[in-house]
Amino acid sequence: MGILNAYYFPDGNYRDLDQHITSVNTFRILFNKYFGTKLERLPDRIFAFPDYSNVYDFYDITDVVGGTWGAPRKIQPRAGPQKN
């Protein structure tokens, strides 16, 4: 989605992260871990917009790109040239 979310925790404890985390929860996890806050995680949803002329017309594409609560969706490879 154009956002790189990279984490480095000096203690090596990454248990609060999972494969479906989105950037909306980056600072919530960081603040809870290192500053003792008790911020609840927001739903890890992914939104897009149709084109750069309509950047405020968001629509939810979470289920299209893999979903939040299940295993990532497997993308079927395109059929390539047939080998003889």
Image (cartoon, grey):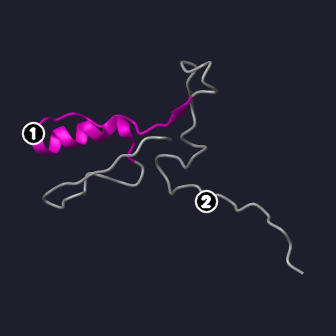
Residue 43 covered by magenta stretch: yes
* Label total for image: 2
View extreme (bottom): residue? 84
**Residue drawn 57% across the image and 37% down it:** 61
The amino acid on which the numbered mark 1 sits, given as a three-letter code, is Gly
Question: Which residue position is annotated with label 1?
Answer: 36
| Residue 72 position (above or below residue 53) | below
Taking depth in this image into account, of 34 and 82 the one nearest to the observer is: 82
The residue at the point 18 percent across, 61 percent down is: 12
Rendered location of residue 11, percent (x, y): 13, 59
Residue pushed farthest right? 84
Could you say where residue 7 lies in the image, as x and y percent from the top left? 27, 51
Residue kind at label 2, given as amino acid type? Lys
Quadrant in the picture for residue 83? bottom right
Task: Point out residue 1 in the picture as x, y percentages from the top left corner.
Answer: 50, 41
Badge 1 density bin: few <14, some 14–19, many ≥20, Cα 10 Å: few
Task: Tell me the residue at 39%/42% (across/down).
Answer: 22
The CA span between labels 1 and 2 is 37 Å
Q: Which residues are magenta?
A: 21-48
Point out the tag, 1 or 2, that comes first from the N-terminus.
Answer: 1
- Residue underneath mark 2: 74
Q: Nearer the viewer, residue 8 or 58?
A: 8
Q: Is residue 17 left or right of residue 81?
A: left
Answer left or right for 36 relative to 44: left
SS class of the residue under badge 2?
loop
Residue 43 lies left or right of residue 63; in this view the side is left
Q: Is residue 28 left or right of residue 67?
A: left
Q: Determine the image quadrant of residue 81.
A: bottom right
76 drawn magenta? no
